[in-house]
Amino acid sequence: MATQQLTRNQSLVLDALSHAEGPLSAYTILDKLRDHGFRAPLQVYRALDKLLEFGLIHRLESMNSFVACAHPDHHHHHDHGVTAFAICEDCGQVTEMHDTAMEERLSVLAGKQHFKTEKTTIEIRGHCQNCTAE
Amino acid sequence: MATQQLTRNQSLVLDALSHAEGPLSAYTILDKLRDHGFRAPLQVYRALDKLLEFGLIHRLESMNSFVACAHPDHHHHHDHGVTAFAICEDCGQVTEMHDTAMEERLSVLAGKQHFKTEKTTIEIRGHCQNCTAE
DNA sequence: TCAATTGCGTTATGCTATAACGTGTGGCAT
DNA sequence: ATGCCACACGTTATAGCATAACGCAATTGA
């Protein structure tokens, strides 16, 4: 199957996120899409839910906002394993990171507790290279 | 210096969290403390802010709620490094985990991006041992 | 004493997210 | 074709999470 066919609303929301500099909140997206007919939060949230399900976007728990996935080459919505995010508190830039050693370690940790992992959130707040060099 | 002296409000909030089965939201805490004179969200949030600052509680980003720190033996508020949380979606139980290998790995990842880490959030959602055994 | 700091209480407001209702459309088995 | 079902959509209302802004009281320290 090729890339998941998106509805109009889903495409609009994904576009908004893709063209944004950094993460956007649902309400910020709503404002950006008012010209395209969006009027209510649910229109955004429903699209976000689907895009999350398709693996096309990520939710940043620590800031209640959303970013487009950094891997536009995914033709089917499959798991990319655990993703860690580096979030700059100054400029808002988000860097997506994948690391199998880290996954392995998390798996061991969960295993010790006989814990069955469904979803893992890793978010590093701090300052990116650009913003550190003052 | 011995254990940080807490104000009345801070003590009440900490007690509420300490005696709770699982994580509590700010508004749940507010409800629990109405009998003790709490009337407004800010009374809770201000106490929570201080307790977080003292390292006596943790905030769970993925569920907008708070838990007492699992290390009651800390006599000064120092860093315990990175903490990972295993959160059971069934019973709500939260297990606090520390792992230096994990920290090391995250440090390497951040270093690769020349990212200066301020705070790291690791939250594993899933099912604990008890709730898995059906 | 005076200023600075800190905690507190209150009111109001803003931001984040979902419930519940109804409509329209397209697929599909009968 | 008819009827059914699933799904996306639009709308209104409401629930849940968090902070702004004001003023007061107590404490501390110069």
Image (cartoon, coloured by chain):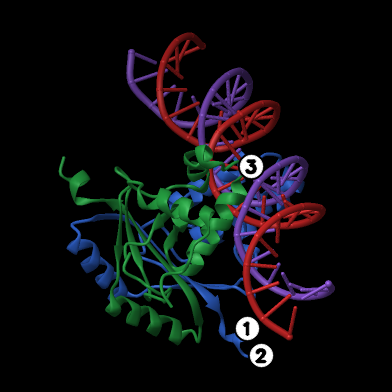
Chain colours: A blue, B green, C purple, D red
Q: Is B7 placed above or below C18 here? A: below
Amino acid type of the residue that numbered disc 2 sits on in the rendered structure: Glu
Q: Could you say which quadrant of the image residue A47 lies in?
A: top right
User: How busy is the neighbourhood of tag 2: few (under 14 within 10 Å), some, or many (20 plus)?
Assistant: few
Q: Tag 3's secondary structure?
A: helix
Which residue does the numbered mark 1 point to in the structure image? A131
Residue drawn at x 51%, y 41% is B36
Determine the CA span between mark 3 and mark 1. Answer: 33 Å
Q: Which mark is residue B75?
A: none
Return the residue nearer the eye: A34 or D24: D24
Which residue does the numbered mark 2 point to in the structure image? A134
Residue A6 showing in the rendered view: no
Amino acid type of the residue that numbered disc 3 sits on in the rendered structure: Pro
Pointer 3 chain: A
x and y percentages locating residue B26 in the rendered image: 51, 48
Q: Quadrant of the C terminus of chain A?
A: bottom right
Pointer 1 chain: A
Which residue does the numbered mark 3 point to in the structure image? A41
Q: Tag 2's secondary structure?
A: loop
